[in-house]
Amino acid sequence: MQYTLSKNDFSGFVKAVMNTHDFIAPIQGDPSKRVQKTQFQPITAPEDIHIEVGNAYFPVKYYFFDKKETIFEFKGHKVIDPIIKLKDRVFFGLRRCDLTGIKHQDMVFYSNQEDPFYKTRRDASTLIGLHCKEGDDYCFCNSVTNSDFFDLMFFDKGENYAIEVGSEKGQNFISTFHDFFKEAGEIITPADREIKNTFKLDTTDIKKLYFDEQWEELANKCISCGACNTLCPNCHCFTIQDEINFDLHTGKRVRTPASCQVKSFTRVAGEHIFRDTRVARYKHRVYHQLQYFKDRHDELFCTGCGRCIRGCPVRIDWVSHINKMNREDKP
């Protein structure tokens, strides 16, 4: 079953949801304010939402992973598990690339082996997508295989939004706020589902390119800042360390995000570093996006959002570089 929501009723719909949920949506960045880049933030009024800003500069993954997660605290021999109290929340305006990124996080932290911290945040979240009509200069989502993964997906149909239900949670959400939705037939057409990209990745099969010497040229530009990992909706590596207080009897174990582009990421006892060169680190990241995750889960990791290129301080364009290597590799 598909539904419609009149744009005239959209403001009322948002206000109704805000009565019972935190409403998180894209907010337009303003260099003069704290939010300087387009990002998802809890809104205080429907007018805060900026639907036409395109894809948010920052992904939503940090709403599911605390930037400094306390796994447990200890006092002497006593271990204290943290309790997460979280209000139900709605994410509105998610693009397919971010939604697929959440799916990949689910595959790692939720479906196969439940992470209790991730599960608490994920269970409290309703995912409402907003279909893109056209990507920006860095998007190449048509070159990868993003999923239909959402609770609800909104399609702009002029005076109305057409809404597709993607889960039982989405259907329950429709039922809860039924006053705003009208049942409709199959009004979402194949043309509505199309996304236009001007940027393209020619191939996702890069096994044959692994020993290409041009990786060195690409990696020489890298400054190992980790921005690509931070902005990627998929990257989820972390480090764990104990923080012990001065009394030596109390402290906590914490988990924080980590970057495979930082040299210390693969450092082990004896100061050995497994990927001690920039080319090894950069190649590892690209191959994880296109090859290693696919080998394990039969699905591409990369969602084609282009954030890693858009946010790179030296604008490393690995997509165009792979296209070049692929063309030169062909007979």
Image (cartoon, rainbow, N blue to C red):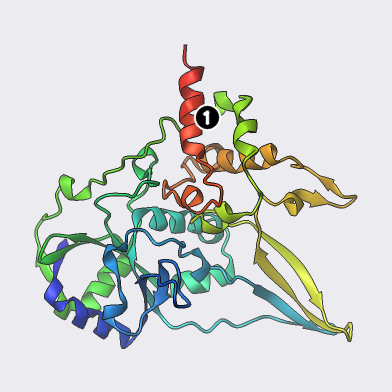
Whole-percent x, y for residue 71 in the image: 68, 73
Residue 226: give x, y in percent of width and height. 62, 54
Q: Is residue 74 visible?
A: yes
Tell me, yes or no, if residue 177 can be seen here: no
- Which amino acid type corresponds to the residue marked 1 in the rendered image? Ile
Q: Secondary structure at mark 1?
A: loop
The residue at the point 61 percent across, 24 percent down is 212
Q: Is residue 330 above or below residue 11?
A: above
Q: Nearer the viewer, residue 184 or 198?
A: 198
Picture coordinates of residue 2 (x, y %)?
Answer: 16, 61
Of residues 99 and 261, the one drawn nearer to the viewer in this rendering: 261
Vertical order, 165 against 275 (above or below): below
Tell me where residue 169 appears, x and y as whole percent: 32, 69
Q: Nearer the viewer, residue 58 or 145?
A: 58
On screen, residue 5 versus residue 134, left or right, reads left
For image coordinates 64% across by 81% down, the residue present is 82
In the displayed structure, would residue 213 be above or below residue 152? above
Q: Which residue lies at the image location 14% right of the left edge and 78% below the top edge?
A: 9
Vertical placement of 273 versus 156: above or below? Answer: above
Q: Which residue is mark 1?
A: 206
Task: Name the residue furthest front.
Answer: 32
Few, some or many residues within 10 Å of mark 1 (<14, 14–19, 20+): some
Residue lying at the far top of the rendered structure: 331
Quarter of the image for the N terminus: give it.
bottom left
Q: Left or right? Give the position of 99 relative to 34.
A: left
Image side of residue 56 versus residue 328, left or right: left
